[in-house]
Image: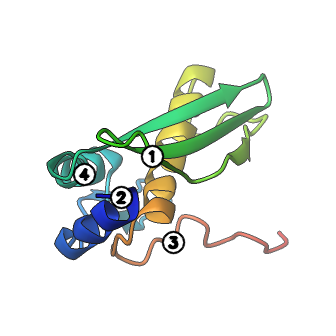
Amino acid sequence: MSINKSLLEVSKELEPIFVDTQNETLGNKYVSYDKLIKIVKNILNKHDLIITFEIESSESSIKIQGIIIDTKTNEKLKSGFINYKIPEIQQNNFSELQTFGSAVTYLKRYILGILLPIATEKDNDGNNSGKKN
């Protein structure tokens, strides 16, 4: 079976995933990465698929891409790299390591949404995106 056929079977099993976390700063609710990956990984593995993430970083940015691999055929589906500039100012008294970890987790959630037809709630983390202060 090709990776496309396996992903079709995965998509038939994916059901909407309900929120379980609230952003303390913005107040919006979203599906946590822990919940998302647990559900997705179980369904992918059932169809002999695995997901991995490739991460590259520098002092000022993170590049990350998701890769779904068919363990039977070694076919791969890549999300393509997403580049994220790390803010110079630490928010919420986060250390540099916490800021990095938070950005990686955030990007992984969105990459899963790029690679798979995952229905979640309206996420408003970018609610001020593109607006001038």
Q: Position of residue 57 (x, y in %)?
A: 70, 26
Q: CA distance from mark 2 to mark 4?
A: 14 Å
Q: If you read the primary sequence from the N terminus, does the residue marked by circle 3 or circle 2 appear first? A: 2
Q: Which is more N-terminal, label 4 or label 2?
A: 2
SS of the residue under disc 4: helix
SS at circle 1: loop
Q: Label 4 amino acid?
A: Leu
Q: Is residue 93 visible?
A: no
Would you identify the image quadrant in which residue 89 lies? top right
Categorize mark 2 by other alpha carbons within 10 Å: few (<14), some (14-19), many (20+). Answer: few
Q: Are marks 1 and 3 in contact (CB under 8 Å)?
A: no
Return the disc, 1 or 2, that comes first in the chain's sequence.
2
Rate crowding at label 1 as few (under 14), some (14 to 19) or many (20 or more) other CA atoms within 10 Å. Answer: few
Left or right: where does residue 61 sit relative to residue 66? right
Residue 26: x %, y % from top left: 50, 62
Q: Which residue is mark 3?
A: 124
Q: Could you tell me how far apart the alpha carbons at marks 3 and 4 are, in whole angstroms?
A: 27 Å
Q: Which label sits in the foreground, 1 or 3? A: 1
Amino acid on which disc 2 is placed? Ser
> In what quadrant of the picture does the N terminus appear?
bottom left
Q: Earlier in the sequence, mark 1 or mark 4?
A: 4
Residue 6 horizontal side relative to residue 69, left or right: left
Q: Nearer the viewer, mark 2 or mark 4?
A: 2
* Residue 60 point in image, percent of width and height: 80, 30
Q: Nearer the viewer, residue 125 or 24?
A: 125
Q: Name the amino acid, label 3.
A: Asn
